[in-house]
Amino acid sequence: MKIAIASDHAGYHLKQALRDGLIAQGHQVRDFGTNSTESTDYPDYAALVGHQVAHRAVDRGILVCSTGAGMAIAANKIQGVRAALGMNPEQARLMRAHNDANILTLGASFTPPPLAAELVDIFLHTEFDGGRHARRVAKIAQLEQQEVLKEQ
């Protein structure tokens, strides 16, 4: 699977560990930074990964910041992105199965590395259920389209 990954400074160490694990599993990983713990702005990295996902250059995205919330908020501003904060295994499963989330965000300050790796694994291996959930995801896309039309 092709995966885009990025973090801000607060998520750097967790991002590095996740990236290395994904590569070891045979995934094609595109790392969009950051490359240190020097202070950075999370929206910049959310945009890089979000555009990769929205343009289908990759299959899924993973973003890490201190809480995971900032990355989710920023990434969801990009049309076609459905980013969700992963906090536990059942939530990670449902965000894929019911919401067709295409970006997982994680909070490095609240997610121990073993749990983060488990959430990533669930996120990558859970398929979208479709059915009634597809109707709801289509309504999300309609909301995005309405906002685009308002701007024109």
Image: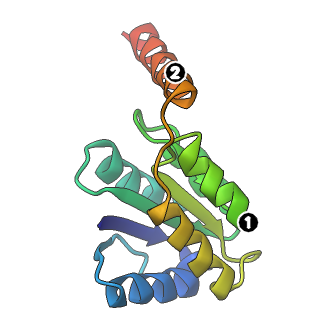
- Left or right of residue 56, residue 47 in this image: right
Find numbered disc 2 in the image and state the secondary structure of the residue it sits on.
Answer: helix
List the residue tagged with mark 1.
Answer: 88
Can residue 36 be seen?
A: no
- Answer yes or no: is residue 91 visible: yes
Q: Quadrant of residue 105?
A: bottom right
Above or below 1: residue 12: below
Q: Is residue 49 above or below residue 141?
A: below
Above or below 53: residue 17: below
Task: For mark 1, give the secondary structure.
Answer: loop
- Three-letter residue code for mark 2: Arg
Q: Which mark is residue 13?
A: none
Callout 2 environment at 10 Å: few (<14), some (14 to 19), or many (20+)?
A: few
> Which residue corresponds to the image point at 64% horizontal and 50% vertical from the top-left?
94
Which percent across, then down, holds residue 25?
A: 36, 85
Q: Quadrant of the N terminus?
A: bottom left
- Per the model, the C-alpha gap separating discs 2 and 1 is 25 Å
Quadrant housing the C terminus:
top left
Please name the colour scheme applied to the rendered image: rainbow
Which residue is at the far right?
A: 110
Image location of residue 144, percent across then percent down = 47, 22
Image position, residue 117 (x, y; %): 57, 80
149, 30: nearer the viewer:
30
**Disc nearer the start of the sequence (2/1):** 1
Residue at (53, 71) in percent of width and height? 120
Query: Which of 67/60 is in front?
Result: 60
Relative to 152, is 73 above or below?
A: below
Q: Residue at x 34, y 66 (%)?
A: 3
Q: Tell me which amino acid carries mark 1.
A: Asn
Point 61% across, 68% down: residue: 65
Q: Which residue is mark 2?
A: 135
